[in-house]
Image (cartoon, rainbow, N blue to C red):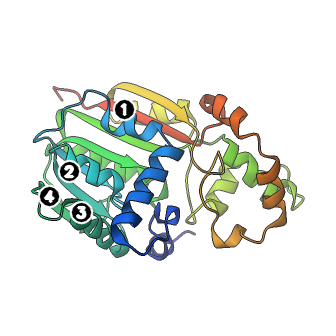
């Protein structure tokens, strides 16, 4: 059985996104993380911030702030920002990012603390938008997290989340490493992702399954899209466990990156969801 402390410990050791930079200068460090994040996964900017969305004085909660890259962008857009994360390291990293980004400039930070997404410390109907990118599939009880997000979202408010797909280029690569190469060709991508992708117990969903789940919570105007992640495109610097993997080296050398990008609606690991809470409940 996967324990929440094992998941938390995994992310305490490496804050999500920080692998993109090892610069010592804080300003260059956070700039490089942001630059490489949005270059590797350009869909994030449009998904998170939109082309014409006005966030001025909107109350926004980010569940899982990571290194604070998107969180800082919401602050720059004059939103009233609330953020939580399961780890102390991410909260500290995000505080550092904010201080580095704004220095003596004003910003509207209301809350940034370690907290459990399965039990949000906020009142019902508080937020105009809730945003969570690549986080909820790591929670022990993802359904409780979605229920809590729905509870604290205002009627007419917007939910934006990204979770992992149960079929992707990343899943195929992991299947080659942990299924085919180990004589277990019948292991599903869902099983392999659960055991081997990032923290233990990582979940993944089909678009059909995810649509059914979110409609069950009462969410409306659902828009689901698939995009290639930095992992699908092998643009993320590899973790320690893959640095000496010869099969991984071969895959990276022969990898059809342009084809995967072209077919991201099929092969993408990232499923983005935009949905509204009904005006009347």
Is 214 situated above or below 152? above
Residue nearest the observer in this picture, 131 or 20: 20
Q: Residue at x 47, y 60 (%)?
A: 17
Q: State how far apart marks 4 and 1 are (Cα).
A: 24 Å
**Labels 3 and 4: the sequence-earlier one:** 3
User: What number is the disc on residue 75?
Assistant: 2
Residue nearest the observer in this picture, 268 or 52: 52
What residue occupies the far right of the structure in this picture?
Answer: 183
**Labels 3 and 1: the sequence-earlier one:** 3
**Labels 4 and 2: the sequence-earlier one:** 2
Disc 3 to disc 4: CB gap under 8 Å: yes
Q: Residue at x 21, y 67 (%)?
A: 99
Question: Quadrant where the N terminus lies?
Answer: bottom right
* Residue that label 3 marks: 98
Q: State how far apart marks 1 and 2 are (Cα).
A: 20 Å
Q: Residue 51 placed where, x, y %?
A: 31, 28
* Residue that label 4 marks: 109
Determine crowd level at label 1: few under 14, some 14-19, many 20+ residues with C-alpha closer than 10 A: some
**Labels 3 and 2: the sequence-earlier one:** 2
Q: State how far apart marks 3 and 4 are (Cα).
A: 9 Å
Disc 4 to disc 2: CB gap under 8 Å: yes
């Amino acid at each position: 059985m996967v324990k929440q402390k094992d998941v938390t410990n995994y992310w305490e050791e490496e804050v999500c996104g920080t692998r993109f930079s090892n610069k010592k200068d804080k300003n260059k460090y956070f700039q490089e993380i942001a630059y490489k994040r949005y270059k590797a996964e350009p869909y994030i900017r449009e998904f998170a911030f939109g082309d014409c969305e006005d966030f001025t004085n909107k109350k926004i909660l980010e569940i899982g702030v990571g290194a604070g890259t998107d969180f800082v962008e919401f602050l720059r857009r004059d939103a009233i920002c609330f953020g939580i994360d399961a780890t102390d390291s991410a909260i500290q990293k995000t505080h550092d990012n904010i201080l580095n980004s704004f220095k003596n400039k004003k910003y509207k930070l209301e809350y940034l603390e370690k907290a459990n997404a399965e039990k949000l410390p906020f009142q019902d109907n508080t937020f105009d938008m809730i945003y969570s990118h690549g986080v909820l599939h790591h929670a022990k009880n993802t359904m409780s997290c979605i229920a809590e997000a729905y509870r604290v979202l205002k009627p007419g408010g917007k939910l934006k989340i990204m979770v992992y797909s149960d079929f992707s280029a990343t899943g195929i690569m992991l299947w080659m490493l942990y299924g085919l190469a180990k004589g277990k060709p019948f292991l599903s991508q869902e099983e392999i992702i659960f055991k081997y992708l990032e923290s233990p117990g990582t979940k993944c969903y089909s678009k059909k399954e995810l649509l059914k789940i979110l409609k069950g919570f009462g969410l409306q105007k659902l828009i689901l899209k698939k995009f290639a992640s930095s992992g699908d495109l092998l643009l993320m610097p590899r973790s320690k466990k893959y640095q000496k993997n010869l099969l991984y080296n071969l895959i990276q050398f022969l990898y059809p990156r342009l084809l995967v990008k072209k077919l991201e609606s099929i092969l993408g690991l990232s499923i983005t969801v935009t949905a509204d809470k009904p005006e009347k409940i």
